[in-house]
Image (tube, rainbow, N blue to C red):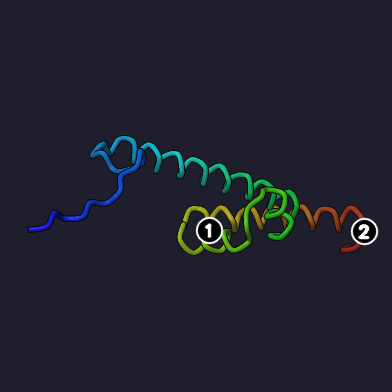
Amino acid sequence: MAASPTLPTSENANTGDDRQRLSLAAQALQRTAAKQAAFLRCLARLGTIQSACVASHVGRRTIYDWIECDEQFAAAFHLAKDAAADLLEAEARRRGCCM
């Protein structure tokens, strides 16, 4: 009977140590949370999704994926949009456009 072929192994192969995998997953979640926070700050300050994406180095499609899949981000997104709208309204009033 012929020997079964073996799959190539690498240093990153699962060694049965789930701690490393959880650590990598936790790191990915931290990076995502940091990117989300950066985007939300930029959105509140700049007022448009496009300009916030450029400033925070996050793709526009990613934002819509986060909104669809993450209820907390979606709520924070709407709050940031409201904050941006408030800034725009205050600036319009300052300029005397809306009396």
Q: Residue furthest left?
A: 1
The answer to whether residue 12 is above or below residue 79 is above
Name the kind of residue labelled 2 in the image: Gly
* Rendering coords of residue 97 (x, y %): 91, 62
Which residue is more in the foreground, 30 or 45? 30
Q: Which residue is mark 1?
A: 74
* Front disc: 2 or 1: 1
Q: Check the image and name the residue furthest to the front.
A: 2
Is residue 70 placed above or below 24 in the rendered structure? below
Q: Quadrant of residue 82?
A: bottom right
In the image, 90: left or right of 24? right
Q: In what quadrant of the picture does the N terminus appear?
A: bottom left
Residue at x 35%, y 38% (from the top left corner): 11
Secondary structure at numbered mark 2: loop
Tell me what residue is drawn at x 34 percent, y 41 percent.
21
Instruction: Give the mark nearer the N terminus: 2 vs 1.
Output: 1
**Few, some or many residues within 10 Å of mark 2 (<14, 14–19, 20+):** few
In the drawing, what numbered circle is on residue 96?
Answer: 2
Q: Residue 90, how many percent across, how many down?
A: 81, 53
Report the residue at 30% width, 44% height from top: 9
Disc 2 from disc 1: Cα separation: 33 Å
Looking at the rendered structure, the kind of residue marked 1 is: Ala
- Residue at point 71% right, 60% down? 50
Q: Is residue 49 left or right of residue 21?
A: right
For the residue labelled by badge 1, is the local secondary structure a helix, a strand or a loop? helix
Along the line of sight, the residue nearer the viewer: 29 or 7: 7
Q: Quadrant of residue 14?
A: top left
Q: Where is residue 92 shown, x and y percent of the image?
A: 86, 58
Local crowd size for mark 1, using a 10 Å CA cut-off: few (<14), some (14–19), many (≥20): some
Quadrant containing the C terminus in the rendered view: bottom right
